[in-house]
Amino acid sequence: MSWPGGSAAAAAVRAAALTAVLCPADPGEPVAVADVVQVLREHGEPGPIELTDADVTQMRAVAADLHAVFAAPSTAVAARRLNLLLRAHAGPPRLSGHDGTAWHIHVDASDRAPWAEWLATSSAMALATLLADRQARPGGLCAAADCRRPFADLGRGARRRYCSATCASRARVAAYRRRSRAVYPKV
């Protein structure tokens, strides 16, 4: 699975970040290899990271499936979508200590599996683990109309609605201004 920091939560956060960069708002927008490498580095993937344009193209197809998990309207739909990803990409679990890393579980074909397979299996397993642990959707899409960025929901309390405190604050301010204009229209 290659979970950064050894946790499903960290891998789910990485899955959301990779999905965000690989699935831009405009599907025709190109995704630079350097942008994907940057996200991988930010989430602790050891170097060297050798990605090609073909790798990124294949990863974008997987990210579209992950985006559908984050966009799932219910826990049951998220579970079905994760099961489809696992059925399509995952193999039997195995322990790996490749490249001097601590022992961890992999469900991809090998330690040198293609990047897209690694993204599908590590992300689906992390999100499935969160879903099973919390009995709730493992993430969502930001409720801010101008954002819609995927995020992993790691909290135990109320359902998270925004990808960041910045988006939540911006949405609250915009709602306040709309209410204020309705109550105190400009003359």
Image (cartoon, helix red, strand yellow):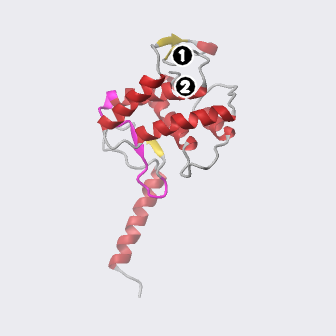
Q: Main secondary structure of the magenta part?
A: loop
The quarter of the rendered structure image containing the C terminus is bottom left
- Residue 165 inside the magenta-drawn segment: no
Under circle 1, the secondary element is loop
What percent of the width, then of the height, locates residue 96? Answer: 54, 12
Q: Which residue is mark 2?
A: 117
Mark 2 belongs to which amino acid? Answer: Glu
Q: Residue at x 61, y 36 (%)?
A: 57
Amino acid at pointer 1: Ala
Q: Quadrant of residue 53?
A: top right
Residue 168 or residue 12, whichever sits in front = 12
Q: Which residues are magenta?
A: 132-147
Residue at mark 1:
109
Q: Quadrant of residue 138?
A: top left
- In primary-sequence order, the first of circles 2 and 1 is 1
Name the residue rendered at 32%, 78% in the picture. 183
Give residue 159's position: percent from left, percent from top: 33, 44
Which residue of the protein is positioned furthest toward the bottom in this rendering?
A: 187
Spatial CA distance of label 2 from label 1 is: 8 Å
Label count reads: 2
Residue 143 magenta-highlighted: yes
Q: Residue at x 39, y 36 (%)?
A: 154
Left or right of 15? Residue 48 is right
- Dot 2 and dot 1 residues touching (CB under 8 Å): yes
